[in-house]
Amino acid sequence: MGRGRLIIVATPIGNMGDITYRAVETLRGCDLVASEDTRNTGMLLKRLGISKPQMSFHSFNEEAAGVRIAAELEAGKAVALVSDAGTPGISDPGFSIVRTLCDKGFEVTMAPGPTALIMALVLSGLPTSSFTFRGFPPRTPSKRRRFFEQDAESCYTMVYYESPHRLLESLSQMLDAFGDRRIAVANDLTKMFEKIIRGTISSVISALAGEKGLLGEYVIVMEGSSNSKPRQQKGNKYKPEGDGDGK
């Protein structure tokens, strides 16, 4: 029996209709599902009519989980890696497991699917030809301020994730660090009450301040600085937004 393989499986971020045929086939055909939360994944599997053994992996046990998955792959098993929602490894656990298994020479592939940052970026109305994803800002105000200050001169569209509890505070610090740039704030993407607020940072703060009970994770997309230009690589001229066909 040869070595098995790891398949990273992206799952819906809200709307179950976004599950792909390949994701379903992968979950049906694998021997083991490595889940960020076995309860959440258990509900997903039940909804799909799939019964599979699960093992838990999260940010506190990734090293140990990687060892177990490597052993399963060595035994010829196919293991599917699933986070709570969206694409594993994108502001979710999974990166260190993938790196470890790649370093050990195991086959690692993916059933791609939903990712909140890409959906928010495309719907923001801001340039998409070049962007930087920065994940979640630090929780403490002083570290968060320095985090934003590092991005102040970037000419690229910036994408951040933020929790509802820190959203307004982060936006206020962004206003201080960047000035009143254009942004888009997305919430409940793919769900019934999907919302995207577009405008300047100050206008979005005003709009959100009037809302009661901010819930769910938010994606913040912000335009880059107009005071700096992208560095041109030798033999590869910078192409402004709209020149490419996206292929």
Image (spheres, rainbow, N blue to C red):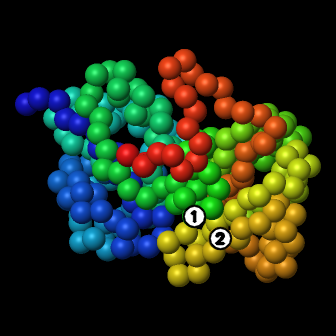
What's the distance in space between the residues labelled 2 and 1, CA to CA?
8 Å
Q: Secondary structure at mark 2?
A: strand
In front of the other: 231 or 90: 231
Q: Residue at x 35, y 26 (%)?
A: 102
Amino acid type at image mark 1: Leu
Left or right, residue 236 beside residue 106: right
Q: Is residue 183 above or below residue 110?
A: below
Q: Which residue is mark 1?
A: 123
Q: Residue at x 52, y 76 (%)?
A: 191
The location of residue 242, given as percent across then percent down, is 54, 50
Q: Secondary structure at mark 1?
A: helix
Q: Is residue 135 above or below residue 115?
A: above
Residue lying furthest left in this view? 1
Q: Which residue is mark 2?
A: 196
Q: Is residue 151 above or below residue 220?
A: above
- Please say whether residue 163 is visible from this viewpoint: no
